[in-house]
Amino acid sequence: MDKEALVIADKFILDACCGGRMFWFDKKQANTIFIDNRVSPKGHRKHRPEHHVTPDIVMDFRKMDLFQDKLFKLVVFDPPHMKTLGETSDMRKTYGILNAETWQSDLKRGFRECWRVLDDYGVLVFKWCETEIPLKKVLRLLPEKPLFGHSTGTKEKTKWLCFMKIPKNPSSNEPKP
């Protein structure tokens, strides 16, 4: 599929690691493109037989070449957050897994891609779970700083952060958000 063949006229939201779309209230949100690097049919999990991973496009968050720069107004980035799960682990089937050797560069590349496809004044929502890797280690990898979100000192393991792509040198002709 080439860029011209990708019809996204009404799509301005990207979920870059959709998995089972578990935090979405509307799992078929019409203005969203859901991508993931895997497909898993219903029944692939023993304890949640209805769980499935069915992205609109099978694509790796580290390389989203099908999308032009500044295409989306909102990007959700919820990458896998564990790197030591076994091949048959139910958690791995649900959330995916990071490569134990390359996880740092993978997260950097993924964030850069999400930032690239995010429009100026667009919002990137980043979700992270500190099960194995503390958020402060992840934040050191990212080239941008969040505007707000859960602090690294809270007891909850799941953290939500909000970033906004504010141009460094906005032109005087550019409309304000």
Image (cartoon, rainbow, N blue to C red):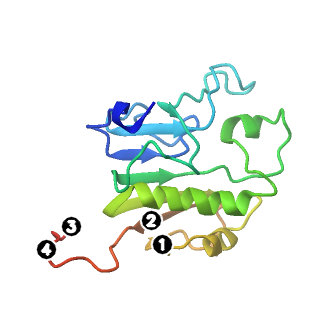
Secondary element at image label 1 = loop
| Residue tagged 4 | 173
Residue 70 position in % (x across, y down): 34, 56
Disc 1 to disc 4, how far (Cα)?
27 Å
Disc 2 to disc 1, how far (Cα)?
6 Å
Q: Residues within 10 Å of mark 2 (few under 14, many from 20)?
A: some
For image coordinates 57% across by 73% down, the residue present is 151
Mark sitting on residue 177: 3
Mark 2 or 1, nearer chain start: 1
CB contact under 8 Å: marks 2 and 1: yes
**Vertically, is 137 above or below 160?**
below
Secondary element at image label 3 = loop
**Vertically, is 173 above or below 38?**
below
| Residue tagged 2 | 162
Mark 2 or 4, nearer chain start: 2
Residue 142 position in % (x across, y down): 58, 70
Does the image show residue 16?
yes
CB contact under 8 Å: marks 2 and 4: no
The amino acid type of the residue labelled 4 equals Asn
The amino acid type of the residue labelled 3 equals Pro
| Residue tagged 1 | 146
**The N terminus sits in image quarter:** top left
Among the 4 quarters of the image, the one containing residue 122: bottom left
For image coordinates 86% across by 40% down, the residue present is 86
Secondary element at image label 2 = strand
Which of labels 4 and 3 is toward the front? Answer: 4
Among the 4 quarters of the image, the one containing residue 168: bottom left
